[in-house]
Amino acid sequence: MPRVLVLLAQGCEEIEAVTVIDILRRAGIEVVSAGLDAHPVRASRGVMLLPDTTLDEALKHNYDMVVLPGGQPGTNNLKTDVRVLNLVRQMAADDRYVAAICAAPSVLASAGLLDGKSAACYPGTLDDFPRVRRQPAAVVEDGKLITSRGPGTAMDFALTLVERLVGKAKRQEVEAGLQR
């Protein structure tokens, strides 16, 4: 069974975080949510989230994919954490999936992963990264880098992650149960 790490920073976008965790778990994928510290996470709209573990503990294990929800100031908190930057670089170097939504693709760009690559993001998020080929699609895949625009595309993003990890048939099964 694939194993996915979802990073929950203070101020993350709750729709993106919860949708990804929920949809992946519906597909039978093992999901570990990790906070950057040992505190509950107050998301961008004030919803309180309880991560499964801390990032330090989570880093003791291997994952098939890491997912970065966006939102502010969550994205800035991810971007300034050297553990996060090292993790996404290592995942990419190991040819594993790295996924980010909304403002979080800027974390990947800051780590140097999006140079010359195509990506989707929240409008304006990647303006400081001219080497990124921004795309208007809801979900953009460039190799094993998967990005998406924002809260409104979170369901499509999560279903794409399911398809990459466990196949199209499982995506269709989960999607049917959602009555989309």
Image: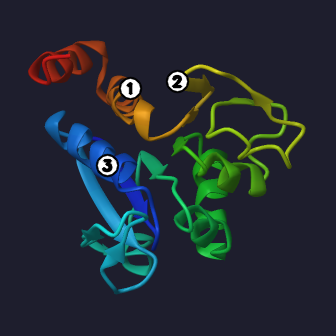
Disc 2 crowd, CA 10 A, few/some/many (<14, 14-19, 20+): some
Q: Quadrant of residue 161?
A: top left
| Image: 36 above or below 39 | above
List the single residue furthest toward the left. 177
| Image: 74 above or below 175 | below
Disc 1 crowd, CA 10 A, few/some/many (<14, 14-19, 20+): some
Q: Quadrant of residue 174?
A: top left
Q: Quadrant of residue 134?
A: top right
* Mark found first going from the N terminus, 1 or 2: 2
Q: Give the x, y percent position of residue 40.
A: 30, 80
Cα distance in 3D space between marks 1 and 2: 7 Å
The numbered disc on residue 3 is 3
* Mark found first going from the N terminus, 3 or 2: 3
Q: Nearer the viewer, residue 39 or 144?
A: 39
Q: Residue at coordinates 38% horizontally, 67% vertically from top-left?
A: 43
Disc 3 crowd, CA 10 A, few/some/many (<14, 14-19, 20+): some
Quadrant in the picture for the C terminus: top left
The reply, left or right, for residue 139 in relation to residue 134 is: left
Tell me the SS state at disc 1.
helix
Residue type, numbered disc 1: Asp
Look at mark 2 in the image and give the residue it sits on.
138
Residue type, numbered disc 2: Ala
The numbered disc on residue 56 is none
Residue type, numbered disc 3: Arg
List the single residue furthest toward the right. 130
Q: Nearer the viewer, residue 84 or 42?
A: 42
Tell me the SS state at disc 2.
loop
Look at mark 1 in the image and give the residue it sits on.
156
Q: Give the x, y percent position of residue 136.
A: 65, 21
